[in-house]
Amino acid sequence: MSSTEPASHPAHAGASATIQPEDARLPALVFWSWLLSRLLFFGPLLLAVQRQQPGALVSRLGQWDAAHYLQIVQQGYAGDNFAFFPVFPYLIRLTSSLLHLPPLAVALVFSNGAFLLALVLLHRLSRQCQGSAIARTVVLLSCFNPMSIFCAIPYTESFYLLFTCQALLALLRPQLNAQRIAIFGALSAATRPTGLVIAPAILVAYGRRHRLAAGLVVALLALGGVGIVALIDLQRSGDPLAFVHAQQAWHVQPGLNLSGLPSWRKLLSQVFLGLANTKAGALVDRSHPILITATLLLGLGAFRLRQRRPGTSFALSLVVLLAYWLLAGMPGLNLLVVLGAVLLAIWGYRRLPLELWVFGAASLLLYLLKQNTISLERHIFATAPLLMLYGAWFDAHPRWRRFLLGFGSLLLLLYALRFANGLWIG
């Protein structure tokens, strides 16, 4: 953040800030960043599919979770599909029926359009709390991020980011608009179950204004989004908790328990022992643990040089990061994203308004309590305060910011090729 432009909403300040007037150049930055990042995904995807499997584009764009959402659109809720919340598929169904358009086409327009709107709000939120320079970095790092793929295909990340940004912006206004907060809070909770954590942020915002009783009412109205999901489940299956019970199809046991520990053990084993050793359940490849240990020791050396020889430290750190990526692959990057998010949440405690920090920290805690490690990085990506802290840290470290923009763009392209071949991302 520039010293000549302080953030208009000091961290944990008692009063909310007024929204600053928008810089006319910045919406252009948002639009072009969004457009270029979409081209960086769809361009390689189209070329790869056309070259390898002509005619397979529709099936590729509708794979993984997208297949479940499109099935809900076309056939309604049944079986394991109750695990997927209704706002996204119901909006697709309504629009597709009214305009007589293919559901997949509507879903793609919605996902990408909602991502653009979410970026506008994320930029506004970041500019209000952190200043224009950081806001620009937040937008760039959000667009040129491999996880932004999930804002290009029929997934809920775009809608969730859009609705939560709307709710968080409303919580920062000097005059709280209970109706607006409740509506966007409920939409968030009916889009993804993690939307529940908007309730603590609402309580903080109202509590700081000595209106906790009113905050309780608004929080309950926001949680009504999950109530709507329960009513739909009751109507369709006779079980109001079908969305909880359906999680068992993904080997998730309802409630808070330790059943997710094997997933974490597997992830750590893949990173530090290697895929071959993890698959064999024995040490059949001694090279991986030796190389990953050497890489981490080199990283420690680079860290210790950061004050005395920053240039050398940065160069060594790049070597370490690239070596770590080549050795640990996607599991290594996933672990790095999770650990980075935890450290950013701690570092950012006094760098965001308390309402935003509570939402970000509560979201992260909920993600870590998941009973598997699948999709943790994309859930973290769709959490606005974590994106803001991500942008703030890298804005303060320009060399890392430039590297990450390039590396993130490379991963976005590589993940597009993986996606074109039906290979898992995340």
Image (cartoon, grey):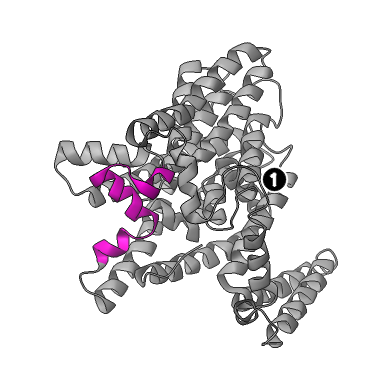
Location of mark 1 (residue): 345
Q: Position of residue 141 (x, y in %)?
A: 53, 54
Could you say which is closer to the camera, residue 418 or residue 133? 418
Query: Is residue 390 visible to us here?
Result: yes
- The answer to which quarter of the image holds residue 47 is bottom left
| The image quarter in which residue 117 lies | top left
Residue 175 image position (x, y, % from top left): 55, 15
Location of the N terminus by quadrant is top right
* Residue 103: % across, % down: 23, 48
The residue depicted at 51 percent of the width and 62 percent of the height is 426
**Chief secondary structure of the magenta portion:** helix
Q: Secondary structure at mark 1?
A: helix
Q: Find the magenta span and give its range.
A: 57-84
* Vertical position of residue 133 compared to residue 205: above or below: below
Query: Position of 290 compared to 336: left or right?
Result: right
Image label count: 1
Q: Position of residue 376 (x, y in %)?
A: 57, 54
Q: Is residue 93 magenta?
A: no
Closest to the observer: 257 or 127? 257
* 417 to the left or right of 11: left
Residue located at (46% from left, 64% from top):
412
Q: Determine whether 244 is above or below 229 in the image.
A: below
Instruction: Give the side of residue 240 with respect to residue 254, left or right.
Output: left
The outermost residue toward the front is: 238
Q: Residue furthest left?
A: 100
User: Amino acid type of disc 1?
Assistant: Ala
Q: Residue at x 64, y 38 (%)?
A: 362
Q: Residues within 10 Å of mark 1 (few under 14, many from 20)?
A: many
- Is residue 153 visible in the rendered structure shown here? no
